[in-house]
């Protein structure tokens, strides 16, 4: 393999192709999502690669999906092509939190009622 696409993804422009080193025999694309919106695409030559998607974050979900290939300029991937290889972009495992219903103490409700009532009068 000679070249992989750079992050700018223009095959026609020779300046935007990344020459690969002798030991780098794969091209890789990493698509980064924040809250299910694409925010960045990284492309480069690598010597090892594992196709996967993984999530990080708490409150703001950051997801990265990696795609690998082994021919020159092959890392020209779209979302549709990633779906073909069964990488489920929006179906990775994540922790679901269930909120329990707590009964609010009646004394607190009465306190706030009188607090607001007297604050309006005064």
Image: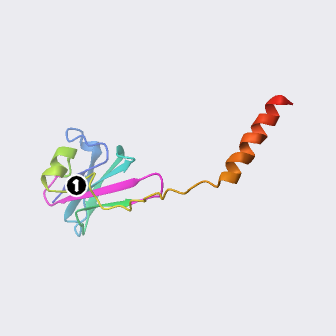
Task: Measuring from the top left, give residue 80's x and y in whole percent.
Answer: 17, 45
Q: Is residue 28 left or right of residue 97?
A: left
- The reply to whether residue 101 is visible in this rendering is yes
Q: Nearer the viewer, residue 44 or 39?
A: 39
What residue is at 74 percent from the left and 47 percent from the top?
A: 111
Where residue 120 sits: x, y (%)?
Answer: 79, 30
Depth check: give the residue in front, 58 or 67. Answer: 58
Q: Residue at x 70, y 51 (%)?
A: 108
* Residue tagged 1: 88
Sort mark 1 into few (<14), some (14-19) or many (20+) by Cα contacts within 10 Å.
few
| Horizontal arrangement in the rendering, residue 116 relative to residue 50 (left or right) | right
Of 29 and 60, nearer the camera is 60
Residue 13 lies in quadrant: top left
Residue pictured at 26% horizontal, 43% vertical = 9
Image position of 98 (left or right of 90): right
* Magenta segment includes 103: no
Q: On screen, 6 above or below 118?
A: below
Residue, x 66% and y 52% (percent of image)? 106
Where disc 1 sits, the SS reads loop
Badge count: 1
Q: Is residue 71 magenta?
A: yes
Q: Nearer the viewer, residue 81 or 111?
A: 111
* Quadrant showing the C terminus: top right
Answer yes or no: is residue 78 visible.
Answer: no
Image coordinates for residue 36, horizontal then vertical, percent = 35, 46
Quarter in which the N terminus is drawn: bottom left
Residue 86 position by quadrant:
bottom left
The magenta span reads: 56-74
């Amino acid at each position: 393999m000679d070249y992989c696409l750079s992050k700018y993804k223009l095959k026609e422009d020779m300046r935007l192709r990344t020459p690969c080193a002798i030991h780098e025999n794969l091209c890789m694309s990493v698509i980064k999502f924040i809250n299910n919106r694409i925010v960045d695409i990284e492309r480069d030559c690598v010597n090892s690669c594992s196709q996967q998607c993984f999530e990080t974050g708490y409150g703001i979900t950051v997801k990265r999906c990696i795609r690998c290939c082994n021919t020159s300029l092959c890392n020209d991937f779209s979302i549709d092509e990633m779906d073909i290889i069964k990488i489920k972009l929006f179906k990775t495992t994540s922790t679901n939190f269930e909120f329990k219903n707590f009964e609010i103490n009646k004394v607190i409700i009465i306190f706030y009622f009188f607090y607001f009532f007297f604050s309006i009068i005064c």
